[in-house]
């Protein structure tokens, strides 16, 4: 994977509990639709080196519950040296994911849950605003990181994981 810094693209994975309150909160039960080891799909990311084009690689995902959060294993069958595992924690009162504020939690008519976190970030050494958009159901799961550089209005996709089972 061309100079891909997994720490820069791995967004935390979590699902939120649909709440009647105005503040989106999450519970560990909300992640149940994506628990399992049978996810396959891809990672598409914008390369960090010229020509800055999109690169897509095969990827797998394994999600298990652990003490204090969820263990997420990212698997790259053609690049096993890039495999990684992280534990993602739910913040106090269930209002953040890895210190990233939850700004939206909606469930569509078909049962697909969409969660959005928003936070300040840095991308390619530039100050920016980032959003991570999670979409999950029993059969599909995706995570897309969008970046908007300070002083600009148009966001671009930095990376996106898309899995099915």
Image: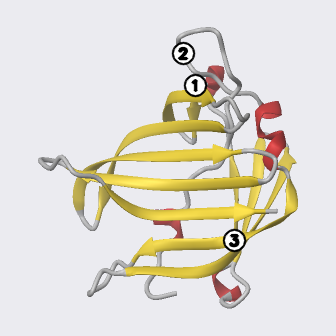
The image quadrant that residue 53 belongs to is bottom left
Mark in front: 3 vs 1: 3
Q: Are marks 3 and 1 in contact (CB under 8 Å)?
A: no
Residue located beneath label 1 in the image: 95
Residue at screen point 57% across, 72% down? 43
Outermost residue, top direction? Answer: 21
Across and down, in percent, residue 162 comes to 63, 63
Across and down, in percent, residue 17 comes to 71, 25
The image quadrant that residue 92 belongs to is top right
Residue located beneath label 2 in the image: 23
Residue 41: give its label: 3
* Mark 1 crowd level (few <14, some 14–19, many ≥20, 10 Å Cα): many
The image quadrant that residue 61 belongs to is bottom right
Q: CA distance from mark 3 to mark 1?
A: 29 Å
Mark in front: 2 vs 1: 2
Tell me the element at label 3: strand
Q: CA distance from mark 2 to mark 3?
A: 32 Å
Mark in front: 2 vs 3: 3
The C terminus appears in which quarter of the rendering?
A: bottom right
């Amino acid at each position: 994977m061309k100079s891909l810094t997994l720490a820069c693209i791995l967004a935390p994975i979590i699902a939120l509990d649909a709440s009647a309150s105005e503040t989106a909160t999450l519970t560990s039960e909300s992640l149940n639709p994506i628990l399992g080891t049978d996810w396959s799909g891809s990672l598409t990311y914008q390369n960090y080196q010229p020509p800055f084009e999109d690169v897509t690689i095969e990827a797998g995902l394994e999600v298990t519950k652990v003490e204090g959060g969820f263990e997420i294993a990212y698997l790259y069958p053609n690049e096993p040296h890039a495999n990684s595992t992280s534990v993602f924690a739910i913040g106090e009162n269930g209002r953040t994911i890895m210190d990233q504020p939850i700004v939206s939690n909606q469930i569509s008519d078909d049962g697909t849950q969409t969660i959005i976190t928003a936070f300040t970030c840095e991308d390619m050494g530039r100050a920016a605003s980032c959003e991570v958009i999670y979409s999950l159901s029993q059969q599909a799961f995706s995570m897309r990181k969008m970046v908007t550089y300070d002083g600009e209005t148009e966001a671009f996709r930095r990376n996106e994981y898309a899995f099915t089972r």
